[in-house]
Amino acid sequence: MPWRVLGQALWFPSRDQELWWLHTAPFFNSLLIQCGYQIHEQYHYLCVYHKYILPVLGLFIRPGIDPDHLSCFTPEGYPFELSVNFQENRSLLRLGCGPIGAFAGTEHDPMNKFATRELLVKLAQLDPNINLGWFDYFDSQLSLPAEEARVTSEQLIPHLRQTNEVAFDLKDGAMVPKSYFFVKPKSIVTGIPTGILAFKAMEGLNVDFGTSLSLLKEHLLPSLDGRDAGSPTTEVFLIGFDCVVPEMSRLKLYVCNTHLCLDNLRAFWTLGGCLSDPTTMKGLAIAEKLWNLLGFSDTLYDEVGVDKLPLTFNYELKLRGSAPKPQLYLPVQGKSDDSVADALTDFFKYLDWHGHACRYKRELVSNFPCRDLKESVTAQRWVAFSFTEPSGVYLTVYFHAIGGDVGRWQ
């Protein structure tokens, strides 16, 4: 396997990087194969992972090792995840990470502010298409100076003491970066609600999003940050964007609500009934089918936590767009991995995606050979869904990248 060949040839400057490789590279390599990447692409992406991503993952969490900084990607705080986007005739692999700086989690960098940009600068030297214009803009709007960051960090659970993070689409030999900025820290220190902060920052880009941004603001802002009395709070969680030239980038607003129910799903999907065109309504019907197959029921949490994941949506905005495109995120962590795999298999059958239906559970079992999927509840963490015409269904499964097959050199 390429992961073993590269690990033995390139080796590692620290025990932590070796442990990261042994606990993630076999799974990463398996997903590359399962998603149809050619052998040269497997070597390429694993080499980039080894050279650029491993050094920013920090300490490998294990008994006796308690890092200063924890990530929201996993309950344990690992700053790394792998996800697969399934479409009818192809699969695309994604890598997500929260790069960890040398002083992250300490008084010098309590909100882990610097490492993401440092990583992107290095990758931009390899790929001239990477553009940090929007990154620097949102950094100026949402990042905190050290003293404010220290005060804010004390009011957040350890897993949310984060300024930004990054994900990469592994596509056509490139690693296309998408960056995300957390909005809550700035809201805490200023007292300004997350919704007002987010829309002010997005409008400050001075980009022509057509009617989509004003439409989103008009119909979403009134429900944000506890403005709708008597309802669980809906907050802006993240602002995301592609790190490419602004003319080609998409802007995404992520919102979450601690009340998981079909009424909220429908309200978020349609912006409270504002979006009612045939494509939106067809997508909603399929989203409700997915909800039912996964066995969700009305659930209310008092707050968001590592084991209390909320109903989440993002709204995608494009230049000169007429309306935002919704994407649903359903938290499946806590459900039996076996039952989630069965539900997704049934969903693939419902879509007539018979290849994915035949392979999904078998590949999941092979990727997590050390887990009893009937007992495990964390191998699959999120299922994301969107729908457009003519592309159709767009389904992404986010996996726990640790705890699968642990590599051995022999």
Image (tube, grey):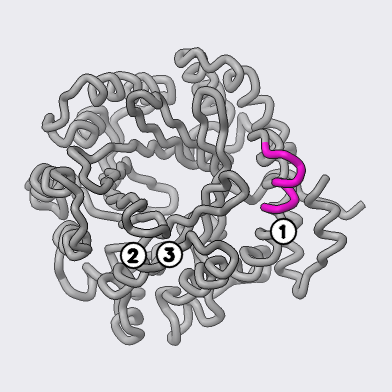
Labels 2 and 3 touching (C-beta < 8 A): yes
Task: Answer whether residue 194 is visible to the viewer in this image.
Answer: no
Point 64% across, 51% down: residue:
402
User: Where is mark 2, residue-wise?
Assistant: 134
Query: Image check: 378 left or right of 229?
Result: right
For residue 157, what is the image quadrant? bottom left
Magenta segment:
37-45
Quarter of the image for the N terminus: give it. Answer: top right
Query: Image check: 221 left or right of 321?
Result: left
Labelled disc at residue 145: none
**Pointer 3 or 1: first along the chain:** 1
Residue 160 location (% of width, % of height): 39, 63
Which kind of residue does numbered mark 2 sit on? Trp
How many marks can you see? 3
Which kind of residue does numbered mark 1 sit on? Cys
For residue 194, what is the image quadrant? bottom left
Residue 282 location (% of width, % of height): 28, 19
Query: Eyeballing the image, is 82 above or below 272?
Result: below
Task: Answer whether residue 30 is visible to the viewer in this image.
Answer: yes
